[in-house]
Image (spheres, rainbow, N blue to C red):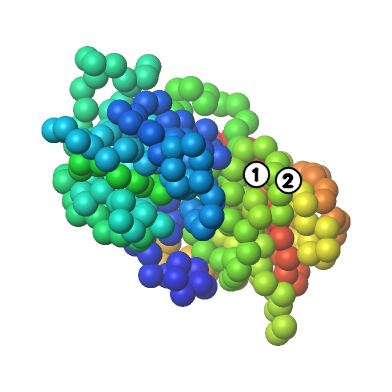
Amino acid sequence: MSDHKTAELPAFARNAVNLASAGLGARGLSATDEFFAPLERMLADAPAVFIEDKFDDNGKWMDGWESRRKRVLGHDHAVVRLAVAGRIDGFDVDTSHFTGNYPPACRIEACNSATDPDESTQWTEVLSTSPLGPSASHYFASTSSEIFTHVRLHIYPDGGVARLRVFGQPHLDRSKVGDGEIELSASLNGGRIIAFSDAHYGTYHRMLAPGRGINMGDGWETRRRRVPGNDWIIVALGGRGQITRAIVDTAFFKGNFPDRCSIQAADLSDFGADVDNAIVTSSMFWPMLVAPQKLSADHVHDLSDAVENIGAVTHVRLNIFPDGGISRLKLFGKLD
């Protein structure tokens, strides 16, 4: 990816899906205490903000989950239902704007349950007790590669967490999918962004989210291009399959939508585990799935009639000419 700050992130934070994203359907189920700030804020997709003069009935308004100061033995914890069952690769325990009220340490457990957890649920530790600091992202790798549906965040002894991000790979259950058409590019089915030329504005990972964008910041947008060429973004599909339908949505992009777009695709199933590192250069030469198509402002473009039959693929490259914003990319087909 092109942004310097993004390149410094661990691999799981760059290329995996945030299974704890409220925008994808994750929900906070319970917390031992949420006196100062509710659990649901901790799962928001947007970066945490600090509003200097904003207060509520209980004190300073904070963008995250915050418990009151503990005056007895014990610690606080919260349970989160992930947006979809999946393998957990790592975490970001983000204490942004919590400076004198952050927890000194955290621990995370996970479970795989068809129903929401109760007192009989068996939990697996996926992050041992780890130190936290003020106003920063803290990246930790998961210690288990099993499939989980819920996580339980422990903070010691109390305090505030701005965002909890649980990065991983959604579990695509073939027995439930069957032979029907699915959205191969969807985050909830395991679709993920691998690389891009530029993502100066918006939240690029939301391009694979369900539904339509809610505003101009809910999608992928590049800065204004001042040199020759065009922008692009590469997506790993949730599974190998043949694409039969393609939709490009420019919702809310009115004075900044791309003039045209095209889609290339390739089957990289033989590349092995290092496919993400070798993908950018090879993508320039992938077969054309959708030849250049004219785009318009704030519109759902169904490009299905232009989709070429190039066989089963695992990755796609969306090209936009010359720059601009795409709210959603939806690619449908059958798993191979």
Among the two numbered marks 2 and 1 on one chain, the one whose residue lies closer to the N terminus: 2
**Amino acid on which disc 2 is placed:** Ile
295 versus 187 height, above or below: below
186 versus 225 height, above or below: above
202 versus 39 height, above or below: below
Q: How many marks?
A: 2
Q: Which residue shows up at 68% across the image and 48% down it?
A: 328
Position of 310 with respect to 153 (left or right) is right
Position of 89 with respect to 264 (left or right) is left
Residue 175 is situated, as x and y percent measured from the top left of the image, at: 45, 23
Q: Which residue is mark 2?
A: 247
Residue 9 is situated, as x and y percent measured from the top left of the image, at: 38, 64
Crowd rating for badge 1 (residues with CA inside 10 Å; few <14, some 14–19, many 20+): many
Whether residue 287 appears in this view of the structure is: no
Label 2 – label 1 distance at C-alpha: 6 Å
Residue 312 is situated, as x and y percent measured from the top left of the image, at: 57, 46
232 versus 332 height, above or below: below
**Amino acid on which disc 1 is placed:** Leu
Q: Which residue shows up at 73% across the image and 65% down it?
A: 324
Residue 243, image quadrant: top right
Q: Which residue shows up at 20% across the image and 43% down it?
A: 156
* Circle 1: element type: strand
* Circle 2: element type: strand
Crowd rating for badge 2 (residues with CA inside 10 Å; few <14, some 14–19, many 20+): some
Residue 283 is situated, as x and y percent measured from the top left of the image, at: 56, 66
Q: Which residue shows up at 51% across the image and 58% down it?
A: 52
**Residue farthest along the left direction in this orientation:** 73
Residues at badges 2 and 1 in contact (C-beta under 8 Å)? yes
Q: Which residue is mark 1?
A: 331
